[in-house]
Amino acid sequence: MRGLNRQMSASREKRQRQAQPEQALTQKQRAELKEQKAAKQKTILYTAIGVVIAILVVVLLVWDSGIFQRGATALTIDGKNYNVNDVEYYYRTAMNTAYSQSYGTAFDPTVDLREQYVDEEQTQSYHDYFLEQAIQDLTTATALEKAANEAGYTLSQEDEDTVRQTMDAERDYASQSGYGDFSGYLKAKYGKYMTEGTLEACIRRDVLTQAFQNQYAEGLDITDEEIQTYYDEHKDELDSFTFRSIVIDGSAPSATDEEGNTVEPTAEESAAAMQAAKAKAEAFAAAVKEADDKEAVFAQLAPDYVSESSKESYESDPDYSLTSDLSGTSVGSRAYSEWMLDETRTAGDVGVIESSSSYYVVLFLDRYLDETPTADVRHILIKAELDQEDDAATTDVDESAIPSDAAMEAAKAEAEQLLAQWEAGDKTAESFGELANANSDDPGSNKNGGLYEAVVPGYMVDSFNDWVFAEGRKAGDAGLVENTNTNQYGWHVIYYQGDNDPKWKLTADDALRSEETNTWLTGLTEGLEATQGDGIKYVNP
């Protein structure tokens, strides 16, 4: 039994040594094993840390690339999600438009727009204002795009050309502005996450919705009765006026003290100056009223009553005080508008009207509805080659911007050849348009057959205007006109396509179409709600 116990004891010791192998090692071996375990644990730890760091680097790189931000949903409208760039496009469009309209004086785009305010009370920041505008515009675009799709409306070839030309113009502007690459320009103009593909998609949506809206407006049936009703309600804006006027300065002069400082006039001095101007204006008005030929006396006496700085103009031109064919819209912005627009006003009335620092004397001559037709014309511009170098000896003239006589003759010869080519054919508006698209140097019309519609007198350069509105001009007439205006030196081949409605009627028609189209848009957008998503914080961050 003792032998068996010894065997069992030896077996247990062996199993214990197998279960606890370190007990069989020397102290040195145990220390080495401990170091190996610690090194292995460090390797595992460092490997894990390295993996985490690598993941973080990738995440940071992806984050800096803007992939996460630009893909985030910023708005949801009528069940459709819009990402950050969709909203940013309309935001930046609103911002750039406001900046250009205010000539950069309203706000500073380089400073946080959240810290600049639309109103003095600081109730709305420019950021909130432009975001509100962007949401409104994108809501309208959503409604129009949905309506266009339901109507089966797609972009025409002309629309596709507009998309391409707009993108080309953006690239050209980026190059001209000195941007190293197009992506840098996009970030500067449309936000840090904008891409070329997204911009083109936004432009495509813009062109589609605008074209669809235009199609709706152009398809409206505006009757003559509606136009007449509009005129009856807006005579003051649509009528034209002929009158003479002068302004008599009523401001008191400033003075200079012994130290050379400017001393502004006192209230008493300013009041006295206005009183003197009033007396002068009333004396002039009285002289005109007493005359049999009021207009002739007005022109004759005007130089004696205006300021010294204006006297020469009135003396050299008897009609300097005359304003003819001025629309009521322009009259309404003048100091004497209330007097002029009075329905009891008749020819020969003379008025003295006070303004802030002067008095006007006005002779009313006529108020009428101008029925002069506008014109639809086509043209081909052949620019003369700029073939001269600037002469340093002539500082007041840049010869490099003026073509030589030979270059002008060459342009004329090309214009004559094109006119002869057209006259040898079927002599139609369509054939003229084809020549214009193929040969005209006018970027504003060489994609639509050289056509300008509803041209009003005085809109074009003098030589062009005089030909178009020459007495007896009729549809089908064609001719040549020289152009010597800066940046337009050359020759025009002109085709008179025909008369169009008078300006007042076109104005009324446009107003009615706009009114009905806005009502239609209101119906399309009614009930549509824009829900802001997490991505909204990345719009102009």
Image: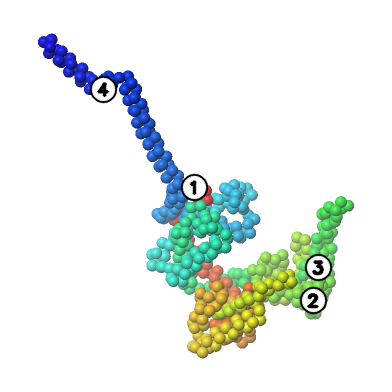
Q: How far apart are marks 3 and 4 (CA)?
A: 115 Å
Name the residue located 50 percent from the left edge and 51 percent from the top edge: 539
From this viewpoint, is residue 282 visible? no
The answer to whether 74 appears left or right of 41 in the picture is right
SS at mark 4? helix
Seen as rendered, the residue at the extreme right is 258
Where does label 3 land, which residue? 309
Q: How far apart are marks 1 and 4 (CA)?
A: 62 Å
Q: How far apart are marks 2 and 1 (CA)?
A: 64 Å
Name the residue located 63 percent from the left edge and 48 percent from the top edge: 121
Q: Distance between the residues labelled 1 and 3?
A: 57 Å
Expressed as whole percent of the image width and height from the top left, the position of residue 427 reads: 51, 87
Quadrant assignment, res 450: bottom right
Name the residue located 38 percent from the left edge and 64 percent from the top edge: 150
Q: Say whether disc 3 or disc 4 marks the residue closer to the N-terminus.
A: 4
Where does label 2 land, which residue? 316
Other-residue count near label 3 (Cα within 10 Å), few / some / many at <14 / 14–19 / ≥20: few
Say which amino acid is labelled 2: Ser
Where does label 1 land, which residue? 537
Say which amino acid is labelled 4: Pro
Q: How far apart are marks 4 and 2 (CA)?
A: 122 Å
Say which amino acid is labelled 3: Ser
